[in-house]
Image (cartoon, grey):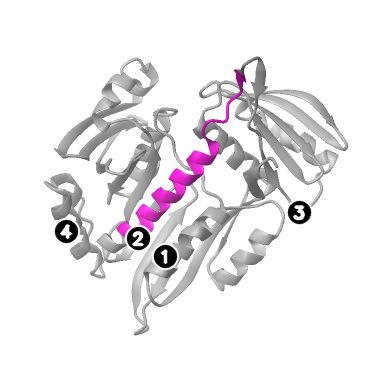
Amino acid sequence: MASPEIVALAKTKSSLFLALDRRYSIREKRPPLRVISALTSLHPEDLGRVLSDRKAFHENFTFRMEPIQENLHRLRLTKRIRGKIMSGVAIVDSSYHGAWMILTNASSYFVNRVLEGFLDTLYPEVSRPKFNHFQIRSLMDRVKQSYPGQQVITSFVIRQNGGTMIVWKEEASEELMKQIQSKKTHLEHLSFDVIGEDKSIVLEATVSAEGVCGLEYGNFSMFYSKLVMSLAEIASDVRKFYSDRERRVKNGQVDLHPYVIKYSTIFSKASFSQLTSWLRKEYMCSVIHEGNPYYAAMLSDYRDGSSFGVTVLGQIVTITPIAPANPPALWRLTSNIQALFGEGEVADLS
């Protein structure tokens, strides 16, 4: 049986972790414990000020942020969905610099329809990571170092050609590598087990491209320190890559900091028109050139006004941040392009 009261009644971080250690080290039917990573410099108690003038938010959500102890708050959240009230509770751990870790063992419906929707309304003050396969593999390598034994991928979800979702549950480890190496594949979700040296399962967990870690079974404290915190470190490193890139003028000289996504195959003219259609779903897109062998467009992000130049030549997509160009917007644009074209290598323009 699920026990949301563990989250609802926690009085200290240590007592919360102890209770979750006990609960998830026992085999029983219950929702998984989920930890959602959110990137922000806000203090949790500043949310009311940030949201005070957002009418659309107040039409859908009500929330209360209750302090528990330093860097630990309880979030009580309610949303009206089709005339019905859906409520739940989460814990916000703001001890990691530049990020919140949001813990809940509420139902999947609450997490997917209420909590994640709530976080999306906080953009750009609070943003969600957009991990690709390379970054998730980096996490899995860290997990392997922390947990002795065998790591087994039990299932995964990928997106191909910008839309098709494929789920694999048999021979998942080998199949995942085959799919990722093919063109136009983007990893969305991964489930895995860690089998200890005595052949027993010591961890059943999940991780998503949007930074949601799930614990099905295992020691929570170790899961949190070795998996969740490792993912937070990876997110911090990626955010640094996208920071301080917007166009500036210094001493009369234009200072640009473009970066690239490198692919193994050359893009066709058909790919260019597909890219335009894909980008126009989320951006104001002005196409400058759309014919072989070159593509060029200027984009403006509807959500925060960030602007970018996007060019494609040969095997390279080049993204040039203009101004403004917020790090979360750059990460999201990169992820959107990879969701269409697959997971190329992201690097500075050399």
Residue drawn at 31 percent across, 32 percent down: 79
Magenta residues, start to end: 225-249
As drawn, the residue found furthest toward the bottom would be: 198
Between the C-alphas of marks 1 and 4, the distance is 23 Å
| For marks 1 and 4 on the same chain, the one whose residue lies earlier in the sequence | 4
Rendered image: mark on residue 19: 4
Q: Is residue 137 above or below residue 267?
A: below
Residue 39 falls in image quadrant: top left
Marks 1 and 4 close (CB-CB < 8 Å): no
Residue drawn at 42 percent across, 33 percent down: 120
Q: How crowded is mark 3: few (under 14 residues within 10 Å), some or many (20 or more)?
A: few
Q: Residues within 10 Å of mark 1 (few under 14, many from 20)?
A: some
Query: What kind of element bears circle 2?
Result: helix
The kind of residue tagged 3 is: Ser
Between the C-alphas of marks 3 and 2, the distance is 33 Å
Between the C-alphas of marks 2 and 1, the distance is 6 Å
User: Left or right: where does residue 150 sit relative to residue 168?
Assistant: left
| For marks 2 and 1 on the same chain, the one whose residue lies earlier in the sequence | 1
Query: What kind of element bears circle 4?
Result: helix
Residue 37 pos. (x, y %) = 38, 45
Residue 84 in view of the camera: no
| For marks 3 and 2 on the same chain, the one whose residue lies earlier in the sequence | 2
User: Left or right: where does residue 12 sit relative to residue 129?
Assistant: left
Marks 2 and 1 close (CB-CB < 8 Å): yes
User: Left or right: where does residue 350 sit relative to residue 21?
Assistant: right
The kind of residue tagged 2 is: Lys
Q: In this view, does 148 lie above or below 13?
A: below
Q: Is residue 199 above or below residue 58?
A: below
Which residue is under mark 3?
Answer: 264
Which residue is under mark 1?
Answer: 143
